[in-house]
Amino acid sequence: MHFIYKNAQPSGSAFLFLDACRLNFLIMNARAKHYDLLCSTVKTALLFAIFLHCAIAGVTQINLSDAAPSTLGLQAFKLQLQRACEQRSVALLRPLLADTIYDGPDDCGYPGCKPDKFLKYNFHENDDWEQLANILRFGFRKVSTVGDEFGGDSATQCVQGPTYEGQYDYDQQLFVVKRHVAIKGQPDVHAKTIEKVSLTLLQKGGEFVTDCEGCIPHRDHYEYEFDGKLWLKVLGTRGEMGYIPIDATSDKFFKTIRLCKIQGDWKIYYWFHNRPT
């Protein structure tokens, strides 16, 4: 027989049990109320992390393969060009020039000039030979001449180097043209190394500014000179700002060369840059 006491009160242990239940209920209720906020916060942080990773890692995707046709004529021409570059010989370079060469935009520019005049402006300083050596190291890619401002047509075969040019926004990015280049915490060779990078794209640091109305925007606090060496502020692949020597980047090696097959022979068609300096 079971007896039920309507006015019976719970014991002390029962009170503790009930308090524990109430506390657990309150915690669960609070969790439920803030669950959406927590999920939203975590989702936002996760998306930002993914974005940052893509912004840093994704920019390294650039095709460096030499896509020039492997014809005997072009290969022989490239060997001649390599020999002229190694010997820094204007005499060896002269026969490789087209009848009209475009350069500039400061010298021959458009409509171009004859080889002798072209050589008055170019390949007297070490810089031009260093630029050419860099191009030959990376190789060439095929280019279309349809609609070309220099008069090329669809029947003209052309290749252009270096391979990395034209594959990134040089206002926003730079390409590291060498291997195992140290990004420093300060623009100083003796500063702490943040990381080492090889043949990759990096985001440029600094802010776009204009000094006057109608002036071309440039980056403020991007170039730093210390002890006779010029450094560039960049965002490293791990998300940390640092400094890299300009001599290891496409800000230094920005010249392009185009080789075209003209009347059956490969020639240097232009030696150019299209950047503000």
Image (tube, helix red, strand yellow):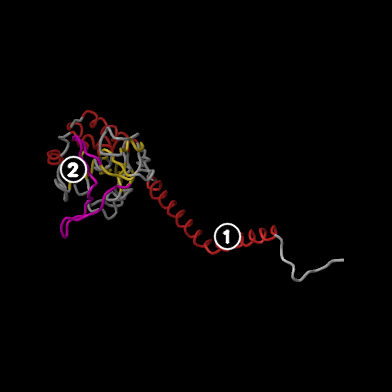
198 displayed left or right of 257:
right
Residue on which disc 2 sits: 99
In the picture of the structure, the residue carrying the numbered disc 1 is 27
Name the kind of residue labelled 1 in the image.
Answer: Ile
Q: Residue furthest right?
A: 1
Q: Amino acid at mark 2?
A: Asp
- x%, y% of residue 83? 25, 30
Q: Would residue 234 be seen by someone viewing this image from the given angle?
A: yes
Where residue 156 appears, as percent x and y from the top left, is 29, 48
Q: Residues within 10 Å of mark 1 (few under 14, many from 20)?
A: few
- How far apart marks 2 and 1 lie (CA) works out to 84 Å
Q: How many marks?
A: 2
**In percent of the image, x 25 and y 36: which residue is there?**
188
Label 1 near label 2: C-beta < 8 Å? no
At mark 2, the secondary structure is strand
Label 1: element kind: helix
- Look at the picture and state if 2 lies above or below 115: below
181 sits left or right of 36 in the view: left
Q: Could you say where residue 134 lies in the image, as x and y percent from the top left?
A: 28, 36
Please report the bounds of the magenta region as a residue range: 203-231
Q: Nearer the viewer, residue 149 or 131?
A: 131
Among the 4 quarters of the image, the one containing residue 211: bottom left
Q: Is residue 190 magenta?
A: no
User: Is residue 73 something one can see in this rendering?
Assistant: no
Residue at position x 20%, y 49% in the image:
276
- Left or right: 215 as drawn, with respect to 238: left
Determine the residue positioned at 30% across, 37% down: 184
Which is closer to the viewer, label 2 or label 1?
1
Percent across and percent down for residue 32 are: 56, 63
Instruction: Please identify the quarter of the rendering in which residue 252 is found.
Output: top left
For disc 2, the neighbor class at 10 Å (few under 14, some 14 to 19, many from 20) is: some
- Quarter of the N terminus within the rendering: bottom right
